[in-house]
Amino acid sequence: MAEHNLLGNKGEMLAARYLMEQGFAIREYNWRSGHKEIDLVAQERDVLVFVEVKTRSSEAFGDARDAVTPLKQRRLVLAAEAYVKAKKIDLETRFDIVTVVGSDDSHKIEHIRDAFYPQLL
């Protein structure tokens, strides 16, 4: 597996652990709909939370959350719609970003709630 994939997988596991410590239940890891993927599907009380995890070894290449471009947001929204339909879920939804910067031993996690809102067509 490529090094950047290993880093991403570690970041997703650290993000999931962080969210569980905050009281979230993790419903899915890496849920796919066609070519679209949701890193984590979590639930916080009665809210279904779609989480995009961005992992960087350092901040040398800029803020990790900047990588969640409008196109990436649109793909996440489409995947979330597919998830809700496939699972027949009737809950309020939200889109969060969790950034993980650093290594296993020393990392910083930032959780951005309501990071973006689906655009109306």
Image (cartoon, helix red, strand yellow):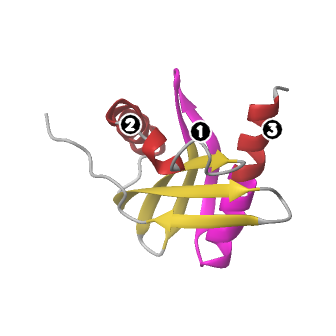
The location of residue 119, given as percent across then percent down, is: 20, 42
Counting residues from the start of the chain, the first of labels 1 and 3 encountered is: 3
Counting residues from the start of the chain, the first of labels 1 and 2 encountered is: 1
For label 3, the SS is: helix
Q: Amino acid at mark 2?
A: Thr
Q: Amino acid at mark 3?
A: Leu
| Residue at x 48%, y 45% (from the top left corner) | 87
Residue annotated with mark 3: 6
Q: Is residue 92 above or below residue 44?
A: above
As for residue 105 lying within the magenta part, the answer is no
Residue annotated with mark 2: 69
Furthest residue toward front: 60
Which quadrant would the N terminus be assigned to in this image?
top right
Q: Amino acid at mark 1?
A: Trp
| Residue at x 73%, y 60% (from the top left corner) | 14
Q: Which mark is residue 80?
A: none
Residue 93 placement: quadrant: bottom left
| Residue at x 55%, y 58% (from the top left corner) | 98
Front label number (1 vs 2): 2
As for residue 18 lying within the magenta part, the answer is yes
**Dot 1: few (<14), some (14–19), or many (≥20) neighbours within 10 Å?**
some
For label 1, the SS is: strand
| Residue at x 47%, y 75% (from the top left corner) | 45
Q: Which residues are magenta?
A: 12-38
Label 1 close to label 3 by CB (< 8 Å):
no
The location of residue 30, given as percent across then percent down, is: 63, 40
